[in-house]
Structures are given as structure tokens and as C-alpha cells.
Image (tube, rainbow, N blue to C red):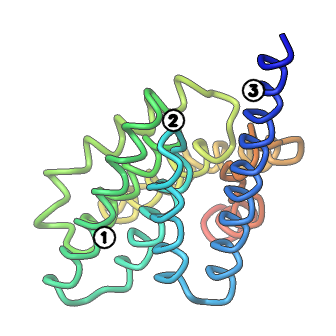
Amino acid sequence: MKTIITIAICLFTFTGVAQNQYEKGMQKAFELWQENKPLEAANLFERIGNAESDKWLPYYYASQIYILQSFNEKDETALKAKLETALNFLNDAKTNSDNNPYVMTLEALYYTAWVAYDGQKYGMKYAGKVTQLYEKAIAISPENPIFILAKAEWEIGSAKYFGKPLDPYCKDIQRAIDLFATFEPEGQFYPSYGAERAPEVLEMYCK
């Protein structure tokens, strides 16, 4: 009995230390990102993901960094390299989290990056996938303002491209704003962005 208790204590202690290392690593990665060192942050997220095989968030953020970086990329070769790296991390996040609406929304952003680079070349190919991913994410979590805002922004972008009215999507932006007022992340390090952007989008397109 004493041996079992000793083993249990050791396992608990090891788990606590490992969790503490995970938290410190994630906090450091976010600090690097805030210090405008996104690639260093992505590298650290990748190392955390490799060490924490059951976690999806490190790979999610590593992928997100490369996707966001690609939106400013003008060279197609460099764009493809960034988005290929992003897709690899995205697939790792999928492996660690099944049917995850956050990962779906990030995948939608991945395809949006292709469309933003060349709408004529990639719009017909990927636009339907983007819409389907947002709809699936919202079906899973209909009260999450992150997903509602992301889908509305995509729809506004599409409407602008085709010269259609933007008003139909303003109610979704307002709904996201209302939901952000009481929104709480589902867990530690979960995405929580959008609360500041939603009013900006409303002011930009709906006033």
C-alpha cells in the first residue's frame, strides 16, 4: 500500500511539473509574439506541440502565425512555403483534436489567405470550403462570437468583391459584439480574440 501511495505521489508531482512547463512555454511563446517576434513564437509553439503530444493549441497558434504572415506576402513562392508550413501545423492540430470548431475556423482562414492572394485563381476553388467550414464551426458552437465574427467578415469580403450590399451581415457583427460582452474562453490559452475588432468592423462597414 505504501508503495502504491509513493508511486501515486510521484506521478502527481511529475504531472504537475510537466503542466507547469507547458504553461510557462505557452506564456513565453505569447510574449515573443507580442514582442513582434512571430517566427520565434511559432518555433516555440512547435517545440511545445512536439513535447505535448495530446495538446492541440500549440500547433493551432503555430499555424495561425504562418497564416497571418501570408496575408502580407506578395511573392507566390514565399506564400506557398508559408502556407504549406501552416497546413502542416494545422494537420497536427487536427490530429490532437477531433471535430474542433477552432481548428475549423483556422482552416477557413488558411483558405482565405489563398483567396486574398489571388481571388480569380483561388476564389472558385476555395470559397465554398471557407463557407462550409464556418457554417460547421457555428453549428457546433452557435454562441461563440469568434466564429460568428469570422464568418461575417468573410461574407462581407465576398460581398465587396461581387459588389453586393453589406447590410445583411451587419446584424451578425452586432450579435458577435453582444456575445463578446459575456464571452469566456473555454480553457487556458484558448483563443479569445475579436472583442476589440468587432466594433471596428461594424464601424467600417455598417455605419
Question: Residue 165, which numbered label?
Answer: none
Q: Where is residue 105 in the image (x, y as percent from the top left)?
A: 47, 46
Which residue is rendered at x = 36% and y = 52% of the image?
Answer: 90
In this picture, is 48 found above or below 144?
Answer: below
- Three-letter amino acid code of the residue under disc 1: Ala
Question: In the structure shown, which secondary structural element does the residue marked by tag 1 occupy?
Answer: helix
Which residue is rendered at x = 39% and y = 39% of the image?
Answer: 94
Name the outermost residue toward the top. Answer: 1
Query: Is residue 26 found left or right of 123 in the rendered image?
Result: right
Query: Is residue 116 found left or right of 102 in the rendered image?
Result: left
- Quadrant containing the C terminus in the rendered view: bottom right
In this picture, is 182 found above or below 136?
Answer: below
Reading the image, the residue beneath label 1 is: 116
Mark 1, residues whose alpha carbon is within 10 Å: few (<14), some, or many (≥20)? Answer: some
Whether residue 170 appears in this view of the structure is yes
Tell me how far mark 2 sits from mark 3, CA to CA.
38 Å
Tell me how far mark 1 sits from mark 2, CA to CA.
22 Å
Q: Going from the N terminus, do you reach mark 1 or mark 2 first?
A: 2
In this view, the residue in front, 4 or 50, is: 4
**Which dot, 1 or 2, sits closer to the camera?**
2
Q: Which quadrant would residue 158 be assigned to in this image? A: bottom left
Reading the image, the residue beneath label 3 is: 7
- Three-letter amino acid code of the residue under disc 2: Pro
Which residue is rendered at x = 84% and y = 20% of the image?
Answer: 5
Q: Do the residues labelled 3 and 1 touch (CB within 8 Å)?
A: no
Q: Do the residues labelled 2 and 3 touch (CB within 8 Å)?
A: no
Tell me how far mark 3 sits from mark 1, CA to CA.
55 Å
Mark 2, residues whose alpha carbon is within 10 Å: few (<14), some, or many (≥20)? Answer: many
Question: In the structure shown, which secondary structural element does the residue marked by tag 2 occupy?
Answer: helix
Q: Position of residue 189 (x, y in %)?
A: 71, 53
